[in-house]
Amino acid sequence: MQPSIKGLLLGKGSGVAGQGFRYIIAGGTAFALDFFLLYICTHFIGINYVISAAVGFMAGLLVTYVLSTRWVFSRRKMANRWAEFLLFSLIGLIGIGLTMLLVWLFTEHAGLHYLLSKIITTFIVTGWNFAAKKIILF
């Protein structure tokens, strides 16, 4: 039987599909903050777009951590929350590195606008983040 949307949103779908559904919503929320900060830092503050991408990603990382531990994943593999956060952050640091590299590559070498580069990069890095968190932490 397929879980209902309400069941998925309330966390009753604890399988990979339910977790993936909630992760997409959590990630979308984090992405909105990430993208907003990228735009604001670059256009209004004048920070280089690669650095702005990292700032936005870090803010999104914090949102994703809170939502992942409280709503997305139904169980945790680690009892020590500090160790969990450190691993979560390590996965995030790899994500930041991938984000900075891919945004730069798509912008400088593929000739895309940096905001379009960020959107494409987000799909790639989201896949990495979900898989790594699911396998290692949750």
Image (cartoon, helix red, strand yellow):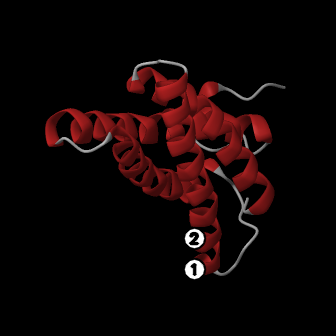
Q: Nearer the viewer, residue 65 or 15?
A: 65
Residue in the picture at 36% in, 51% down: 55
Residue in the picture at 25% in, 45% down: 47
Task: Tell me where residue 16 sits by quadrant.
Answer: top right
Residue in the picture at 54% in, 57% down: 70
Q: Nearer the viewer, residue 95 or 30?
A: 95
Viewport quadrant of the C terminus:
bottom right
Vertical arrangement, residue 66 with respect to residue 82, above or below = above
Label 1: how many Cα within 10 Å (few below 14, some 14–19, many 20+): few
Q: Are marks 2 and 1 in contact (CB under 8 Å)?
A: yes
Residue in the picture at 62% in, 26% down: 5
Q: Amino acid at mark 1?
A: Trp
Vertical arrangement, residue 103 with respect to residue 69, above or below = above
Label 2 and label 1: CA atoms lie apart by: 5 Å
Task: Tell me where residue 76 sits by quadrant.
Answer: bottom right
Q: Which residue is mark 2?
A: 85
Residue 112 lies, in percent from the top left, at: 46, 18
Label 2: how many Cα within 10 Å (few below 14, some 14–19, many 20+): some
Residue 54 lies, in percent from the top left, at: 42, 49
**Can residue 22 be seen from the camera position used here?**
no
Viewport quadrant of the N terminus:
top right
Q: Which residue is mark 1?
A: 82
Q: Amino acid at mark 2?
A: Phe
Direction from residue 45 to residue 113 in the image, left or right: right
Vertical arrangement, residue 82 with respect to residue 100, above or below = below
Q: Secondary structure at mark 2?
A: helix
Direction from residue 134 to residue 88 in the image, left or right: left
Looking at this view, name the residue that lies furthest to the front: 109
Q: Nearer the viewer, residue 65 or 112?
A: 112
